[in-house]
Amino acid sequence: MRSRAVLALWALLATMPAARAAGVEEPVRVVSMNLCADELVLRLADRAQVLAVTYLASDPRGSTVASAAAGVPVTRGLTEEVVALRPGLVIAGAFTTRTTVGMLRRVGAPVLELGVPADLDGVRAQIRQVAEALGHPERGEALVADLDAKLASVTPSTRPLRALVMRPNAFTVAPGGLGDALIRAAGLVNVAAEIGRDRFGQVPLEAAALADADLIVTDEGTPGMPSLADTLLHHPVFRALADQGRTVAIPNRFWTCPGPQVAEVVARLAAAANARAPRP
């Protein structure tokens, strides 16, 4: 019944006249259904093009565009919400609710699904893909140029130090993904390639302790907002590593999505490595 109602709504809206002057091509109006899409849309689109983003876009703990998202309508990813906005384009991510994406395709909504880049070239390609879809390819090129300029300003580690990422609940950065590419761009070696991980990508505390990494990379927590997921990072082993200057905290929002902000990860990793004194 729900799918029939959505189909009927879309069919009704499709028959309504579009609000545009004859012969005038208007920029595509977009609904974003994924935080990573939110970030690119808000960086690349005209404000008038953005019909809605996700509620996550305005949360500065995970979003790099929280200020730009202020005042922008939000959705919770329900098909009815998106259809009612009559978007010219819906941008979803690889992990966007599959039921909603499938329903949108069934009702004929134009959907662009973004993949998960595995390297910096993939980041550049995705920026260009979204900019082209929004009708602003020149903005995509400018954003890529900003990314490349920031990366070019980074001095990679002069020593191949071994880095281990330990996120909340002991999740690490597996080899072969974008996070791994950022570690390597900073001139570091990803220890996760050497030690055991479970099938969820978590590193046992014992394995982390025995890895003898030069740098342990953690998430920069939010003051006054403790989490059980961070309990492991308060273990005496990690406290000892911190006392030795072997930890570096980077805000999660810089890692979460592929975009120009990933250059900040490379810069902070390289700076921490270059500041690390050689072992005696």
Image (spheres, grey):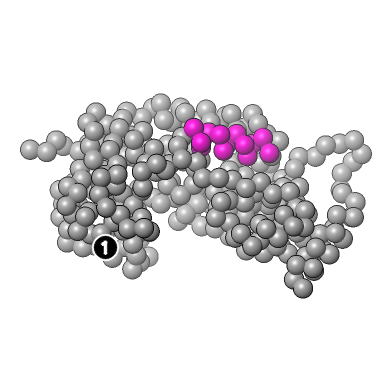
Q: Secondary structure at mark 1?
A: helix
**In the image, what residue occupies the spot 24% across and 62% down?**
234
Percent position of residue 5, x then y: 80, 69
Residue at the left extreme? 280
Toward which corner of the image does residue 193 lie, by quadrant?
top left
Q: Position of residue 61 (x, y in %)?
A: 45, 56
Image position of 53 with respect to 278: above or below: below
Residue at 22% over, 54% down: 208
Residue at the image position 66 percent from the left and 46 percent from the top:
112
**Residue denoted by label 1:** 232
Query: Magenta stretch?
Result: 121-133
At x 54%, y 58%, the residue is: 56
Q: Is residue 112 above or below residue 263?
A: below
- Judged from this view, the residue extending furthest toward the bottom is 1
Query: What residue type is disc 1 on?
Result: Leu
The N terminus - image quarter? bottom right
